[in-house]
Image (spheres, rainbow, N blue to C red):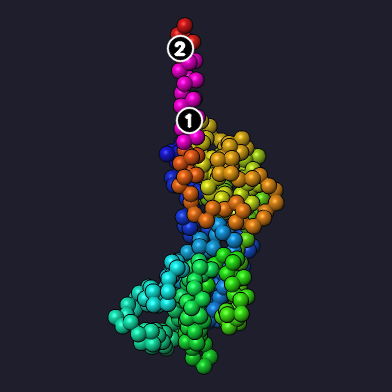
Amino acid sequence: MYKEFFGLRANPFNVNPDPRYLFLTRHTEEALACLTFGIQSRKGFVLLTGEVGTGKTTLINKLLEWLRAQQVPTAFIFNSRMNVPQFLDYMMADFGLPSETRSKSQVLIRLYNWLLERYRAGETAVLIVDEAQNLPDEVLEEIRMMTNLETFTEKLLQIVLVGQTELEQRLKHPNLRQLRQRLTLRAKTHPLTAEETKSYIHQRLRIAGSNGQQIFEPEALAAIHRYSGGIPRVVNLLCEHCLVSAFVDQQKTVGAGVVDAVARDFDLEGSQNVGPASQTVPDKFDLMDALKTISNLTERLKESHREGDEVSKEGKL
């Protein structure tokens, strides 16, 4: 709707975790380096955690892109609300090893033999589990047992466990002590600083086709960081709705006032302090909030048209 108006080829602030838009900060580079090193050196078990909306899934999608380019067999599990049989079925299917048997032991034997074949061919395999904070204890225990699939010197299956910070708390529970002890590397995502938020927005606009023209005024960029707390998902939501609002008003730039209005629609507080992301980040895109914002913008557009009609009538008089 607004792409042509701002001279863009694509939607720069889509909330989907598109690896093309990965923004590299020092923390992001460290996390990506940690993940790739853990896999290449066959460390066996790597943990990635971070607050909601800080870019974990985008980072993982970039990792998957790299792994697939290297033709590394991967299984990516993003539905974490499942039991052990469902988990094993999904994993085997994603590895291209669908199993007809319901016997867990037979499934694991087949997996072990396949991993040995990969190892003898000089290859490895990677299992990535997203939203792992939601996994039942019995599934986490099954994942721990998979770290026993090894030779005398190396792990056959490289496991990347991804989750919100609650996962770190769960792993401190005595029941999961053995799983915690198996972790060899840990990585973490962080909110953006004010300067990083500015660069993040400019990068996404550039990738989407912007010719470098100023769309967000400096005061607007500062306000976006203030309201979002540097959480990329919230930055995207704010920027998306700010562009829609500016388009409705036929304004080529977004000022701080537009950001304030959109932030009010999302009930975001303008705190300078970056607190826990759970205070400001919706776990998922909220359709009702989006409809409310669109309704507000529509009313403003109608008012603008009414004012224009009144001016036209006065001119005729």
Q: Which residues are magenta?
A: 295-311
Marking on residue 92: none
The three-letter code of the residue at mark 2 reads Lys
Mark nearer the N terminus (1 vs 2)? 1
Marking on residue 313: 2
Q: Which residue is mark 1?
A: 299
Question: Relative to 108, is 25 on the left or the right?
Answer: right
SS at mark 1 in the image: helix
For the stretch drawn in magenta, the main secondary structure is: helix
SS at mark 2 in the image: helix
Q: Nearer the viewer, residue 176 or 188?
A: 176
Residue 316 percent across, percent down from the top left:
45, 8
Q: Is residue 298 magenta?
A: yes
**Residue at 56%, 59% in the rendered image:** 52
**Residue at 47%, 77% in the rendered image:** 139
Residue 28 percent across, percent down from the top left:
59, 63
| Quarter of the image that includes the N terminus | top left
Rendering quarter of residue 51: bottom right
Circles 1 and 2, Cβ within 8 Å, touching? The answer is: no
Question: Relative to 60, is 94 on the left or the right?
Answer: left
Q: Is residue 6 visible?
A: no
Q: Nearer the viewer, residue 123 or 250?
A: 250
Residue 131 percent across, percent down from the top left:
50, 66
Q: Is residue 83 magenta?
A: no
Residue at the left extreme? 100
**Residue at 52%, 35% in the rendered image:** 246
